[in-house]
Image: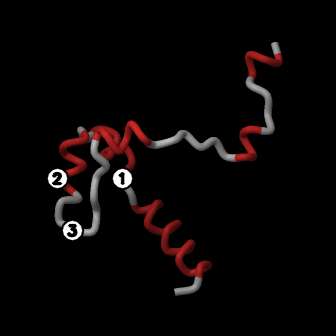
Amino acid sequence: MPAKKQLEEADRAIQEVDWEKLRAMSDDKIRAAWAWDKDMTWPTDEELAEFDLVIPAKSRRKPPKEAAE
């Protein structure tokens, strides 16, 4: 599938999400709702501890607000 079509599908899917309902759900309820997808795996606590925070380059160029004051 071409990248443009994939982006269009993703945009459409995002618009269909009931974000208020999702925000009200606990992590356990979210995991249960996605349990049918066998390709979906949740990272373990150990894996999460190894993740690195990546700040997009666009955001890194701006000085923090507190530095500007």
Residue 63 is situated, as x and y percent measured from the top left of the image, at 79, 28
Residue 32 is situated, as x and y percent measured from the top left of the image, at 17, 52
Farthest residue toward the top?
A: 69
Residue on which disc 3 sits: 38
Q: Does the residue at mark 3 contact the one at mark 1 (Cβ under 8 Å)?
A: no
Q: Does the residue at mark 2 contact the one at mark 1 (Cβ under 8 Å)?
A: no
Residue on which disc 1 sits: 18
Q: In this orientation, which residue lies closer to the viewer: 58 or 23?
A: 58
Q: Earlier in the sequence, mark 3 or mark 1?
A: 1
Other residues around mark 1 within 10 Å, as few (<14) / some (14–19) / many (≥20): few
Compared to residue 36, the image places residue 20 above or below, namely above
Disc 3 marks a residue whose amino acid type is Lys
Disc 2 marks a residue whose amino acid type is Ala
In the image: residue 31, left or right of residue 23 = left
Other residues around mark 3 within 10 Å, as few (<14) / some (14–19) / many (≥20): few
How far is the residue under mark 2 from the one under mark 3?
A: 12 Å
In the image: residue 28, left or right of residue 43 = left
Q: Residue at x 72, y 40 (%)?
A: 59
In the image: residue 1, left or right of residue 65 = left
How far is the residue under mark 2 from the one under mark 1?
A: 17 Å
Compared to residue 14, the image places residue 68 above or below, namely above
Farthest residue toward the right?
A: 68
Callout 1: helix, strand or loop? loop
Residue on which disc 2 sits: 32
Compared to residue 34, the image places residue 66 above or below, namely above
The C terminus: image quadrant: top right
Residue 48 is situated, as x and y percent measured from the top left of the image, at 37, 41
Q: Residue at x 47, y 61 (%)?
A: 15
